[in-house]
Image (cartoon, rainbow, N blue to C red):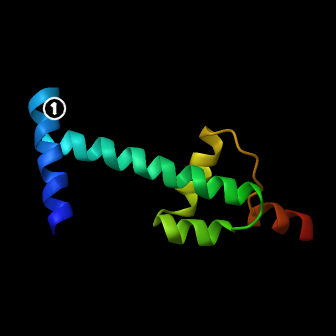
């Protein structure tokens, strides 16, 4: 709990000097650490050490959102597309 109080005091200090609200500061921190985690997971994905299902479970996001992140970061990926296989079978 001592660490949490220190974090709260740091956020209060940032709010007073920065002119932002507490929620804006926390949101910025959330975005920063989420992007940091996504970048680490993408490195493992590129090395084929982790699959999409494991990554989405760890990050608690949907597969679609992860593929969108990959598109935004211009990372090559292959996606299973059931409709194409059905057309080939017929």
Crowd rating for badge 1 (residues with CA inside 10 Å; few <14, some 14–19, many 20+): few
Q: Closer to the camera, 87 or 13?
A: 13
> From this viewpoint, which residue is outermost toward the right?
89
Name the residue: 75% across, 62% down.
81
How many numbered markers are drawn?
1
Residue at the image point whose x is 17% and y is 27% from the top: 18
Q: Is residue 53 visible?
A: yes
- The quarter of the picture where residue 46 lies is bottom right
**Where the N terminus falls, by quadrant?**
bottom left
Residue 48 versus residue 9: which sits nearer the camera? 9
- The foreground one among 36 and 8 is 8
Q: Position of residue 75 (x, y in %)?
A: 71, 44
On screen, residue 27 above or below 40 = above
Please report the residue visible at 64 percent of the width from the left and 53 percent of the height from the top. 42
Left or right of residue 70, residue 59 in this image: left
User: In the picture, residue 12 is in which quadrant?
Assistant: top left
- Secondary structure, mark 1, is loop
Percent across and percent down for residue 73 are: 63, 39
Q: Quadrant of the C terminus?
A: bottom right
**Which picture quadrant has residue 88?**
bottom right
**Left or right of 5 on screen, residue 39:** right
Residue matched to label 1: 20
Instruction: Residue 83: give x, y in percent of width and height.
Output: 76, 63
Q: Is residue 90 visible?
A: no
In this view, the residue in front, 68 or 58, is 58
């Amino acid at each position: 709990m001592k660490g949490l109080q220190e974090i709260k005091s740091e956020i209060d200090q940032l709010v007073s000097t920065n002119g932002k609200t507490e929620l804006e500061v926390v949101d910025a921190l959330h975005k920063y650490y989420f992007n940091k985690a996504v970048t680490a997971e993408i490195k493992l994905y590129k090395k084929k050490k982790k699959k999409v299902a494991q990554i989405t479970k760890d990050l608690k996001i949907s597969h679609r959102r992860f593929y969108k992140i990959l598109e935004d970061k211009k990372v090559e990926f292959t996606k299973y597309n059931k409709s194409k296989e059905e057309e080939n079978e017929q």
